[in-house]
Amino acid sequence: MAVIGSVAAVVVGATGFGVYALVGEEQPGGGGPAATADGKQPEAVETGPPTAAEVRSTAGAFLDAWAAGDARQAAALTDDQTTALTTLSAFREDAGVAEIAFTPKEPARGEVPFRAEAQVAHEETTADWSYEAALKVVRDEKTGDAVVHWEPSVVHPELEEGQTVETGEAGTPPIKAVDRNGTELTKEDHPALGGILADLRKRYGDEAGGEPGIETRILDAKGEETGTTLLTLSEGEAGTVQTTIDVGAQQAAESAIAGKNKAAVVAVKPSTGEILAAAYTPAPGFNTAFQGLYAPGSTMKVVTGAMLMDKGLASPGAQHPCPKEFEYGHWPFHNDDHFEIKGGTFAQSFARSCNTAFISQAPELENDSLTNYARDVFGLGLSWQVGTTTMDGRVPVQDAAQMGASLIGQGGVRMNPLNMASVSATAKTGVFKQPYIVSPRIDGRTLTSAPRTMSPRTASGLRQVMHLTAVSGTAAVPMSGLSGEFGAKTGSAEVMGQEKPNAWFTAYSGDIAAAAVVPAAGHGGENAGPVVRAVFDAYGG
């Protein structure tokens, strides 16, 4: 009687792998497991990691079935057949993958890298698509079979749980964003504008008059865009969106903060509110220029100073206390290096950034005084309609020591360079004009207005103290050599656990206002001031 020994027939599949079909296996020693009640031998369940031959055969069979369009057979070779069948079927149907072929690479520890080459079709448009992916072969604990461990990344490395791949018209047409003079703005030339430009496409792509392209992209579990495009079949026709950016000021802003680990700067046009430049590092990344949340430190004294003058608690030429220390809310506040000004004026205290000159007025204020004034006159905390996503300032109502700290830009006060550039712009004109990067004429939106304007007397006094700061105070060095109307304020915001404070600087010169923050850098005049000055020097008006 012939005995069938260990024999393996090799079948070469389309993947180029040898697909091993095990024909039989000899039982060593002529024995085996005890027979069951019906006389049949129980099958032994294989354990341990798959062998190299099993890895090759399983991966090859899976890729061959997938390439042949047999999603059911391919899914049957995985450890999650239901999910695999759904995903593989959708990949061919929704993603429009008409043909696909695979080139496996050398396996390593059960993982098989492979290159996929596909043809994607949508109506009359087709495109070739290739990418690198990988699958892993594991041992099924119940059956002992070698199977493909199912993960979304088997289909494409960027695909995550619950996501799908779809080919069709892009959600919105592409745009060609240009600066105020018609120069094109791209994320390649201006990385800090990348996120803003993408947001402008979502907001204004339909209004710009373009035609959407055909893209293969990843959608989330709700079928919404994730922002990940895998393949562009056709570019579509871009519509033009004009921004308020001035490319010269933008380039200067980017150059001024290049090399700084974290920094941000924004410039606006006081007469209109138009945003002239916005840059931040690292870029691309989170837009700290428009959405950052930083304590503004002494730059907030522009707002507080205006409030004190408006309430009759200060006047540029009037004597004003600046002691070494002042206690409020059971907390001792002091000046940098504990300096004091004896018999000085409010303008002198402002120019030297005397903390106690502001804290000393806290007993005369209500807890919500700064909150109300910042909102009603400077527009801080209102909902700005900039044309892209922004954080529009936070000045919460606080009491005791925290209320006192708010007066000097600490406590719960939070700003970003867009907010503080707007503060200087309001100081320059006496009127809050909401910043914007796309004209409201494009979409008909209504810009936010502040409930009231600064009184002429207060506006004049504020410009006076900011000018003194810029010519002989803490902002004199970066502002030197300027002519015409200009003013500035420095800031150094202390952050718990941080060795150096965040450096701030806000200023105006002619019809441009700007603000910059350089975190963990030190004094504002030394570290943020030169950034603002570089933007001033580059702007031609």
Image (cartoon, rainbow, N blue to C red):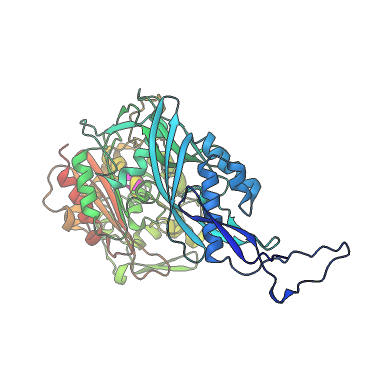
Q: Is residue 234 magenta?
A: no
From the top left corner, tell me how far across and down residue 502 is, in percent.
Answer: 33, 61
Task: Please identify the residue farthest to the front as the structure is shown.
Answer: 1
Give residue 45's quadrant in the image: bottom right
- Front residue of 376/82: it is 82
Magenta segment main secondary structure: helix
Task: Please identify the residue farthest to the bottom as the structure is shown.
Answer: 29
Give residue 30's quadrant in the image: bottom right
Residue 489 visible at all: yes
Residue 96 located left or right of residue 316? right
From the top left corner, tell me how far across and down residue 440 is, in percent.
Answer: 36, 27
- Find the magenta span and give its range: 419-423
Q: Quadrant of the N terminus?
A: bottom right
Residue 388 visible at all: no
Residue 207, above or below 6: above
Residue 267, above or below 256: above
Q: Is residue 422 magenta?
A: yes
- Front residue of 37/252: it is 37
Give residue 143's quadrant in the image: bottom right
- Front residue of 184/223: it is 223
Q: Which residue is depicted at the point 33% across and 43% down?
A: 194
Q: Which residue is depicted at the point 42% across and 34% down?
A: 215
